[in-house]
Image: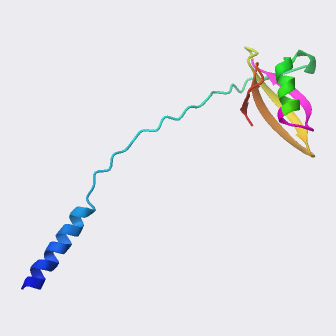
Amino acid sequence: MKKLFLSAAIVVGSMCAFATTNTATAQKIATEMIQDEFVEVGMDTLPEAVKKTVTNSFPGAKLEKAYTNEQKDQYKLDISMSGSMYTIYTDAEGVVIKK
């Protein structure tokens, strides 16, 4: 009889040990919107900061095409490097937004 009560106490105690409240925390995800409406621009109209970003951040890359949005605050750059094409996005100060 003692074994029965002891077993019941262990079972009940183990069920209570795993009963915890689950507190869900909301995660804040920061995203930056990149406008898809880009028009092609000439290489001579690119800001110097954008050109320097390509040469400094991607050594050996060749700038193939450049695009800008209506506000001229974001740039979409098509570069070729090691036989592959890549698209990068920068702002007007040359900060890479998305690789």
The residue located at (23%, 66%) in the rendering is 15
Task: Reply yes or no: does residue 32 show up in magenta.
Answer: no
| Residue 14 vs residue 72, the one in the foreground | 14
Q: Is residue 42 above or below residue 26?
A: above
The residue located at (25%, 63%) in the rendering is 17
Tell me where residue 63 appears, x and y as whole percent.
91, 31
Q: Quadrant of the N terminus?
A: bottom left
Residue 62 located left or right of residue 50:
right
The quadrant in which residue 3 appears is: bottom left
Tell me where residue 76 appears, x and y as whole percent.
79, 28
Q: How is the structure coloured here?
A: rainbow
Tell me where residue 74 appears, x and y as whole percent.
74, 22
| Residue 30 vs residue 39, the one in the foreground | 30
Tag count in the figure? Answer: 0
Q: Residue furthest left?
A: 1
The residue located at (48%, 34%) in the rendering is 28
Q: Is residue 66 above or below residue 15?
A: above
| Residue 93 vs residue 42, the one in the foreground | 93
Region rendered in magenta = 57-69
Q: Is residue 78 above or below residue 69?
A: below
The quadrant in which residue 55 appears is: top right
The residue located at (91%, 19%) in the rendering is 42
The quadrant in which residue 39 appears is: top right
Q: Quadrant of the C terminus?
A: top right
Tell me where residue 2 appears, x and y as whole percent.
8, 83
